[in-house]
Image (spheres, rainbow, N blue to C red):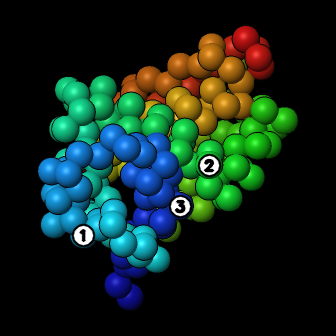
Amino acid sequence: MAAAEKLVFPTIVEGLFVRGLSGKVSFALKEQLRKEGLDLDRPLQPAYSLETWARCVALTAKSLQPEPVAWRMLGERMIDGYRDTMVGRALLGVLRLIGPKRMLLRTQHSFRTGNNYTEVRITERGEREADLWLNEPGLLRYFKQGVMLATVRAASGPATQVDVVQYDDDSVTYRVSWGVPGS
């Protein structure tokens, strides 16, 4: 049986490109994105291949600032924009209530609202620290770092840190730490 194609759903694309980067996508970048399969002047497709998503994020990151900073920043911006979607508003609205530890335990479910491929493993390291393994390929690891940083901050406040501690071509492990909620 062939493996299912890895797909990214439109709420994630909307969160980054339509809302998170609203007014910040140059004409030249829009044209490059269109050539890669993302036409921001048309309604979003029901899904985009992981390859298309990765190429579009890469083009956008290169147009902004040096890697991996740009990738992480785009991940944070995506969450800022995702917060304005119906699904994002609902998901992020409860994070402060459940807190970062419970939020991390729901990470695979949360990511699956935006794609069909994310796998997650959590290893608790202490009361306010955990390792998070994702099957995220290539430079997208830094994009997901920004996603995790903004998401955990939504659950616990600004005293949040997400560091890449190990990676290979197909996966990444982050060390996620947080302070007292509201700190």
Tell me the crowding category of disc 3: few under 14, some 14 to 19, or many 20 or more residues within 10 angstroms, Cα based. Answer: many
- Left/right of residue 140 with respect to residue 75 in the rendered view: left
Residue beneath label 2, please? 84
Using the rendered view, name the quadrant where residue 99 is placed: top right
Q: Amino acid at mark 1?
A: Gly
Residue 11, disc: 3
Dot placed on the residue nearer the N-terminal end, 2 or 1: 1
Marks 3 and 1 in Cβ contact (< 8 Å): no
Q: Residue at x 47, y 34 (%)?
A: 76
From the viewer's perspective, is the residue at label 3 or at label 2 nearer?
A: 2
Image quadrant in which the C terminus is located = top right
Marks 3 and 2 in Cβ contact (< 8 Å): no
Residue 91, disc: none
Please state the horizontal and vertical placement of residue 69, each as a whole percent of the image.
30, 26
Q: What SS does tag 1 mark?
A: loop
Number of numbered discs overlaid on the protein picture: 3
Q: Nearer the viewer, residue 119 or 83?
A: 83
Disc 2 from disc 1: Cα separation? 24 Å
Dot placed on the residue nearer the N-terminal end, 3 or 2: 3
Image quadrant in which the N terminus is located = bottom left
Q: Nearer the viewer, residue 3 or 49?
A: 49
Q: Amino acid at mark 3?
A: Thr
Please state the horizontal and vertical placement of residue 22, each as a whole percent of the image.
42, 45
Could one spot residue 110 in this view of the protein?
Answer: no
Using the rendered view, name the quadrant where residue 155 is placed: top right
Rendered view: 158 above or below 76: above
Residue beneath label 1, please? 37
Disc 3 from disc 1: Cα separation? 16 Å
From the viewer's perspective, is the residue at label 2 or at label 1 nearer?
A: 2
Q: Residue at x 62, y 17 (%)?
A: 158
Q: What SS does tag 2 mark?
A: loop
